[in-house]
Image (cartoon, rainbow, N blue to C red):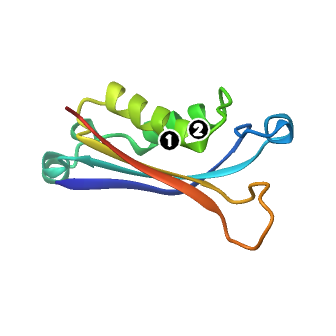
């Protein structure tokens, strides 16, 4: 299987449990891994036989910058679900949502969740 990656996409969203998170918002970073067959696209140099990176980026952007969720787990689930639903060439989607500055006391780089969803 072949893979398309979109790494470290940054968006501004309003996801979180605490009122200040949904009122003030914060940066979220998304990594997307899409499993598909890229052989014909590579042989024929034809975008129609691949999946547009721009379209995948826009799907992630629309979700992260759209409706607020309490959990980043829900953000990841929505991204994976939308991509599997809209792009029939996608066999699996792995989504990592990183919250660089959650309101948790202590020293750490970030918190994140990563999920993989496959076509049945």
Q: Which residue sits at x=35%, y=26%? A: 86
Label 1's element? Answer: helix
The residue where tag 1 is placed is 76
Q: Which residue sits at x=57%, y=57%? A: 112
Q: Quadrant of the N terminus?
A: bottom left
The residue where tag 2 is placed is 61
Query: From the viewer's perspective, is 38 left or right of 22?
Result: left
Query: From the viewer's perspective, is 39 left or right of 102?
Result: left
Which image quadrant is residue 62 in?
Answer: top right
- 18 relative to 68, above or below: below
**Residues packed near mark 2 inside 10 Å, few (<14), some (14 to 19) or many (20 plus):** some
Q: Identify the residue at the far bottom of this view.
A: 107
- Coordinates of residue 119 in the picture (x, y in percent): 23, 34
Distance of mark 1 from mark 2, alpha carbons? 12 Å
Query: From the viewer's perspective, is 25 left or right of 6?
Result: right
- Coordinates of residue 38 in the picture (x, y in percent): 19, 49
- Coordinates of residue 103 in the picture (x, y in percent): 79, 55
């Amino acid at each position: 299987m072949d893979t398309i990656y979109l790494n470290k996409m940054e968006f501004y969203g309003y996801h979180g449990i605490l009122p200040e998170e949904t009122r003030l918002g914060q940066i979220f970073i998304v990594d997307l891994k899409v499993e598909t067959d890229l052989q014909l696209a590579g042989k024929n140099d034809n975008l129609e036989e691949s999946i547009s990176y721009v379209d995948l980026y826009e799907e992630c952007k629309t979700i992260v910058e759209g409706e607020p969720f309490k959990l980043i787990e829900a953000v990841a689930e929505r991204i994976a679900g939308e991509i599997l639903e809209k792009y029939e060439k996608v066999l699996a989607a792995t989504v990592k949502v990183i919250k660089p500055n959650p309101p948790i006391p202590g020293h750490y780089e970030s918190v994140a969740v990563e999920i993989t969803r496959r076509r049945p």
